[in-house]
Image (cartoon, coloured by chain):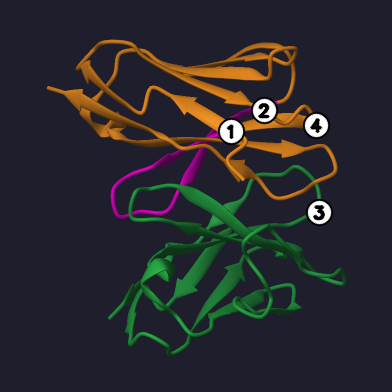
Amino acid sequence: GALVYQYPRRTICKSGTSMRMECQAVGFQATSVAWYRQSPQKTFELIALSTVNSAIKYEQNFTQEKFPISHPNLSFSSMTVLNAYLEDRGLYLCGARETDSNERLFFGHGTKLSVL
Amino acid sequence: QQKVQQSPESLIVPEGGMASLNCTSSDRNVDYFWWYRQHSGKSPKMLMSIFSNGEKEEGRFTVHLNKASLHTSLHIRDSQPSDSALYLCAASHQGGRALIFGTGTTVSVSP
């Protein structure tokens, strides 16, 4: 079956430092990977959509300078939160799908980011 | 960014009862709707998707879609305590963009 592993599951970083999270697709080819942030209030925000061999598309309020994403192959993607502050707290989820069309997303367990 | 609105925000349903959840998109380019369920501390898992007008049933779950009003609803009959979760509605364009999620409805099924 299709699985998405995401790590670390939890991380704590000091204000102003950066942290990287990774997403691994198993059992399928992750042509598209979408990164989301779920706030402590449970609101889901799309950060960016990354498709292999295409430019990464960031949503309004999210930038490559703050959330650089790497999607080097069909099984791996990573995202870094640079200069993390309190407002960056939340659960970061990667959702991957095999084609660049309307297929279901398979989600990883998420990386819970706490900022001190 | 919040172009997908869900209601109610939370819902308490007696065990065996019916839960009805609503979702509307304000983006007229949306073609596809998805319902995901997220249990506490877990990642979202897709429940059902619907692309055409009408109704779709899978077990105790039924979704309706009205494309003209961009409104979808999810109905859970014979609700079980294991149905207690955050239910997320998502919408996407035909062009294959990422899903935009709604605000979610927290369902609590009381035994």
What segment is highlighted magenta in the picture? Answer: B35-50
Label 2 residue SS: loop
Give, as a three-letter code, the residue at label 3.
Asp
Estimate how packed mark 1 is, as few (under 14), some (14 to 19) or many (20 or more) residues with alpha carbons within 10 Å: many
Estimate how packed mark 2 is, as few (under 14), some (14 to 19) or many (20 or more) residues with alpha carbons within 10 Å: few
The answer for which chain carries disc 3 is A
- Who is closer to the viewer here, A63 or A12? A63
Query: Quarter-wise, where is residue A7 in the image?
Result: bottom left
The answer for which chain carries disc 1 is B
Distance in Å between CA atoms under marks 4 and 2: 9 Å
Distance in Å between CA atoms under marks 1 and 4: 12 Å
Instruction: Using the rendered image, report if marks 4 and 3 lie on a common chain.
Output: no
Residue B29, numbered label:
4
Residue A100, numbered label:
3
Instruction: Report the quarter where the N terminus of chain B lies.
Output: top right
Give the percent coordinates (x, y) of residue A44. 49, 49
